[in-house]
Image (cartoon, helix red, strand yellow):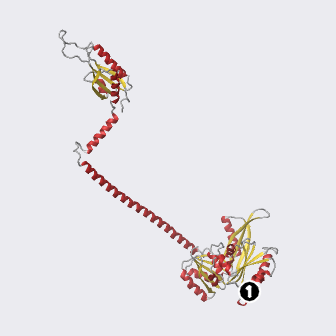
Amino acid sequence: MARRILLCLSPSGATVAQWKGNLVEVSAFGADDDGLAAFGAWVAKSTGIPALVVVDIPEEDYRFETMPHTTGRDRQDLLARKLKQFYRGTPFYAASVVSQSTSKTGGRREDVAMFCALTGAEAITPWLRILRERGLPLVAVHALPTVTPAVARLLKLDTRNLLLISRQQAGLRQTFLKDGGFRLSRLTPLHASEDRGLETVFASEVRNTRLYLDSQGITTADDVITVAILDQDDSLVLLPERILNLGGNLLCQHLPRSALVKQLGIPATVLDTSRDALHLHLLGGKVSAPNLAMADMVSDYRLYRLRHLLFVASGVVATAGGLWFGTQLYRAVDLDDQTVEAATQAERFHRLYEQLTRDFPAAPAGAVVMQKTGDFAQRLRATAPSPEPLLLALSQALEKAPSISVQTINWSYGKSAYQSGALGSPVTPGAGGDTPGATGMVLGEISPFDGNYRAAVDTIRLFTEQLRASPAVADVRVVKYPLDDSSQQVLSGSTSARAERKASAVFEVLVRMREGGGGR
């Protein structure tokens, strides 16, 4: 729990301490003007620290009512109406639902609510006023008996009917717990003259409490009640014997100072400071008890919590902003380092390039021209067909006609090559008017040639048939034979004179390639 100021108020005065995981700086002040002044000087050193108050006065009231089961806003309104009916003259009251039950008659669910109040507010108001004047926000005001059940949980006192007895600054405090829940409490003021006969007085008060419980129907005469004595200063060692002598189904369990120190973890020196130190120690832990303070009394604490939450939120935002800034700064530094490294590497590559190209011969064209030429060559290679399929078809056909030798090959792509032929010889498109895309004009010669033109023509026709059989060839046409036997050909020469020149058999073949067979 965070740092707190703990205050126990009683008719005899006030006990105050700081909570820092345990009680420190425990001090007691009398219920007079000097005590109030000294208390004001003490709390002035703790301005801004929240304060929890526990009150131990005889003017207290506890009631248990059975009401119809409600929830939410309806329950709050019902409890508020009951509180106004029960307590009109005090600002310190509270109500809470402690259990639920089922009606024996109608079978409906019912709520058991506890209503508690401090009816003697005059004794505690001056102390609370000093807290506000010194700037200590009030967290809560609890009645001391509602804090006492925490002792039973910590000491593992789990009997059904338990009566806790402790000697406080204000007198003898008896708190009855049934099934671990608070039911009843009595405070008996003690006078200085009664110190010698404490065991007798306490035993008598225990007997009166037992009779009251039986008369109220909280217990019956057959119920066994366990009396647990919280002996903070070992002054009640003889009390268990006196209580057992009373009879009436009473058991007694004495918890000496050493047991309280060991089981509750409270320092022995703290128990020496005040008889209220035990309940201040309980208050420092997380206890569940009704808060009797009104809303306006704890308004300063709400502002304190809001301010604290704002500080925490600001810290979280500042931390997140710092982390973000650090991350961005690291990234910026890293990018700067990468930029410097890239620039250094580029400079190193540039010097290496100059060193390698220093001995290169002068280029006929610049790098830009060479790049454009290369790009243009790649585009031509991607769009114009390759003559490779034609060369493959020629090689296969020449294997069947070894007497034919190829002199030249003119490779062209488009309409003009097919229609105009080669060497100026006109060529007519095929039937249907289809026009090839890629054509090859092959100039060949039959060698050796013995002057037999009929045999030469047969050889050429065999050669063209072999070409036409290739899957990549669409059509093959002989553009020129060794001897043109056309009726339109003009003959000239001498029949008597013997030709002295050597006879030759030169021919031309136009090969049209299929679309897609040009080898893109």
Give the residue displayed 45% in from the left and 64% down from the top. 323
- In which quadrant of the rendered view does residue 32 lie? bottom right
- In which quadrant of the rendered view does residue 118 lie? bottom right
Using the image, determine if residue 165 lies above or below residue 431. below
Where is mark 1, residue-wise? 198
Using the image, determine if residue 423 lies above or below residue 159. above
Q: Where is residue 513 in the image (x, y as percent from the top left)?
A: 35, 26
Give the residue displayed 47% in from the left and 66% down from the top. 319
Q: In this view of the protein, can residue 66 be seen by the observer? A: yes
> Is residue 248 found left or right of 500 in the rendered image?
right
Residue furthest to the left:
497
Badge 1: few (under 14), some or many (20 or more) residues near its Cα, within 10 Å?
some
Q: Position of residue 462 (x, y in %)?
A: 34, 18
> Is residue 469 found left or right of 483 in the rendered image?
right
Q: Position of residue 88 (x, y in %)?
A: 68, 77
> Is residue 439 found left or right of 309 in the rendered image?
left
Residue furthest to the bottom:
193
Image quarter of the C terminus: top left
Q: In this view of the protein, can residue 88 be seen by the observer? A: no
Image quarter of the N terminus: bottom right
